[in-house]
Amino acid sequence: MFGGLIVIKPVFADWDAAYLIILAGAVLNAGSMVATKALERQESTLTILSWLTGISTIACLPALFQPWPTAEHWPSLLLIAVFGSTGLWFGLLAVRAADLSLLAPFDYSRLIMAGLFGFMLFGEVRKLAPSSAL
């Protein structure tokens, strides 16, 4: 949840109720990891991958009512689908092989990588408050 607080802003300037979505996402992600670890004891990795894909598809159904991307965006979307599914597969294999406490630092490293990619690809710079420890 600490990562979510960093994304919101260290001093909570310009508070918005939508920030609760970030905090809820952190809680749901932790719950998902624990549930996945419990399922890994009984189900195959492919079964869990299928369930996660199905649940994600249902959760994304409201996007059907949004404007569809143009054909020029389809290759990028295909890459996202391929790399996302591959990453999920390897993540499930990691959960099967190791304790969640060992995997957590790697999971949180996504924040650092997202910041680096945001800077390298889009020139985004995170503005930290003077009171921030980061």
Image: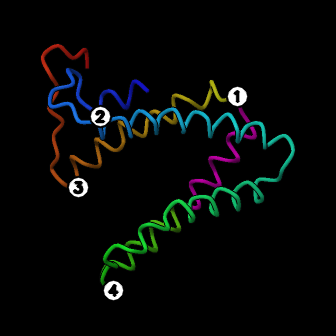
Going by the numbered disc 4, the residue's amino acid type is Ala
Q: Which mark is residue 7?
A: 2
Left or right side of 53 for 98: right
Distance from label 3 to label 2 (Cα)?
A: 18 Å
Going by the numbered disc 1, the residue's amino acid type is Asp
The mark lying in front, picked from 2 and 1, is 2
70 within the magenta span: no
Residue 6 vs residue 84, the one in the foreground? 6
Q: Mark 3 points at which residue?
A: 121
Residue at the location (38% across, 29% down)? 3
Task: Write the start and end of the magenta stretch as one range.
Answer: 84-98
Residue at the location (25% across, 14% down)? 133
2 or 4: tag closer to the N-terminus: 2
Q: Name the residue under label 1.
A: 99
The mark lying in front, picked from 3 and 2, is 2
Residue at the location (38% across, 38% down)? 22
91 within the magenta span: yes
